[in-house]
Amino acid sequence: MKLIDKLFVEKTDNIFLQFFRYIFVGGTAFVVDFFFLYFFSDICGIYYLLSGVLSFIISVLVNYIMSTKWVFNQENIDNRVVEFNLFIIISTIGLVFTEILLYFFTDILGLFYLISKIISAIIVLFWNFIARRIMFYGMKFK
């Protein structure tokens, strides 16, 4: 039970535990993103790159709520408006990376757009984690 509490319940500054939690949160946000990408593209008939923006916005909100409540202890950021704006900036940069990678994998390499989304999400995950970790903790990696 102690391991479960350490992994899922207790607040932590440990980068490895935070990365584990971030993978869990990121996985949840990815499922939301992937579902809405499919929904907007295949059900609503919206162009996949525009669908990617819409689905990304929804998943960022899910990710923000879960990340700030569970993954990172944000004692060093007192202003939630500043925190949210920093989160949005990091997410927007991640969105730009994602859209470039989606276009590259889909239109240049000819992969199915949902396969491109999976590959793009794995690549951008590292940017998002590192940038958010630095936002909440600075450059210290303990």
Image (cartoon, rainbow, N blue to C red):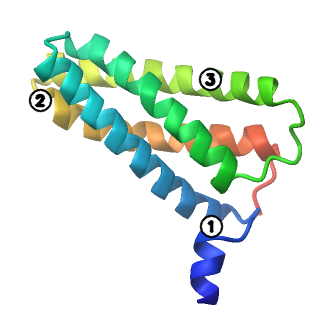
In front: 72, or 141?
A: 72
Q: CA distance from mark 3 to mark 2?
A: 29 Å
> What residue would you read off at disc 1?
17
Report the mark closest to the observer, 3 or 2.
3
Give the amino acid type for the residue marked by disc 3 in the picture.
Answer: Ile
- First-in-chain label (3 vs 2): 3
Q: Residue at x 20, y 26 (%)?
A: 39
> What residue would you read off at disc 2?
111
Would residue 108 appear left or right of 52 to someone viewing this image?
left
Q: Position of residue 29 (x, y in %)?
A: 43, 42
Q: Residue at x 76, y 30 (%)?
A: 83
**Considering the image in quadrants, where does the N terminus appear?**
bottom right
Task: Tell me the number on the disc at residue 88.
Answer: 3
Disc 3 element: helix
Task: Tell me the number on the disc at residue 5.
Answer: none
Above or below, 15 against 135 in this view is: below
Q: CA distance from mark 1 to mark 3?
A: 23 Å
Q: Residue at x 62, y 46 (%)?
A: 67
Disc 2 element: loop
**In the rendered image, which quarter is residue 138 located in?**
top right
Q: Residues within 10 Å of mark 3 (few under 14, many from 20)?
A: some
Give the amino acid type for the residue marked by disc 2 in the picture.
Answer: Leu
Q: Position of residue 107 (x, y in %)?
A: 16, 16
Q: Residues within 10 Å of mark 2 (few under 14, many from 20)?
A: some
